[in-house]
Image (tube, rainbow, N blue to C red):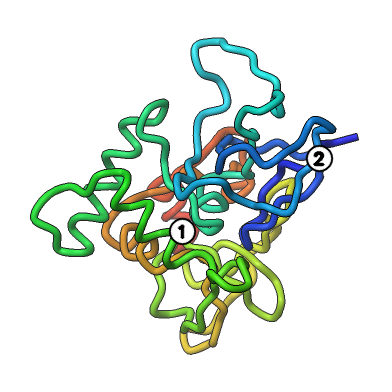
Amino acid sequence: MPLQNRVTPTGEIVADPGRGLLMGNRGCLHGPDRRLGVARWRSKLWICCVLDWKGVRRDPMPPGRWTALFFLDEATALAAGHRPCAYCRRADFVAFAEAWRGAHRLAQRPRAAEIDARLHAERVDPRSRRQVTRPAVAGELPDGVMVRAGGTPGLLAGGALLPWTFAGYRASVPLPPAMPVELLTPPATVAAVAGGYRPLLHPTTAGGSAPATLPDLMPRWVGC
């Protein structure tokens, strides 16, 4: 039976056999019985990491240690409010922080703690402790962010929605530029993506079998 450690674009943590391309954590969320309690985070440091780090094998829910969470891809992790790990994904973190700096017109690259504080203020409601979403217009958002349209969460790409599932993305559905959507990705992260950060995407976005990034997919998306 799968553990409750798969993360959706809406930030929920559920049980599903899918594993995805990235791992991450928000602190220790499980008890001795390997079940999640009420808390969905124990710190503001929400990161997404590589699955394989120097061949180290780790229990996903060791007693008293951080709970390993899994994401279909980076677009999913970013939508849920996570950011690239500054340790195991150093190059990606630097690229993300530089895109963040440019988008927010900062004099210098922000530190991880600054990014975490801003993201935490944008991703969850302090009262309900649920993910905060926002109304938006499809044509005003960059490719690579996650939205919900007609009740369906998905990746925005080339004027279309790629519906999200734990197994990957389904066939794209055209989205009129003026169509109202529910934005899932935090605004500060949206700005970083618009500023040039390219999240790692699941291979089903291109119909292939290897991870893809936005530049790899743009020729295909333009024709959608």
User: Which residue: 48% across, 79% down?
Assistant: 138
Local SS, label 2? loop
Residue 94 or 4: which is nearer the viewer? 4
Q: Where is residue 31? Give x, y as percent.
A: 76, 36
> In the displayed structure, would residue 71 be above or below residue 219?
above
User: Which residue: 64% across, 52% down?
Assistant: 40
**Disc 2 marks which residue?**
35
> In the displayed structure, would residue 221 be above or below residue 4?
below
The answer to whether residue 36 is left or right of residue 153 is: right
Disc on the earlier residue, 2 or 1: 2
Instruction: Name the amino acid type tagged 2.
Output: Arg
Question: Which quadrant does the N terminus fall into?
Answer: top right
Residue 1 or 161: which is nearer the viewer? 1
The answer to whether residue 105 is left or right of residue 88 is: left
- In the rendering, which numbered label is found on residue 144? 1
Local SS, label 1? loop
Instruction: Name the amino acid type tagged 1.
Output: Gly
Does the image show residue 118? yes
Q: Where is residue 170? Give x, y as percent.
A: 70, 58
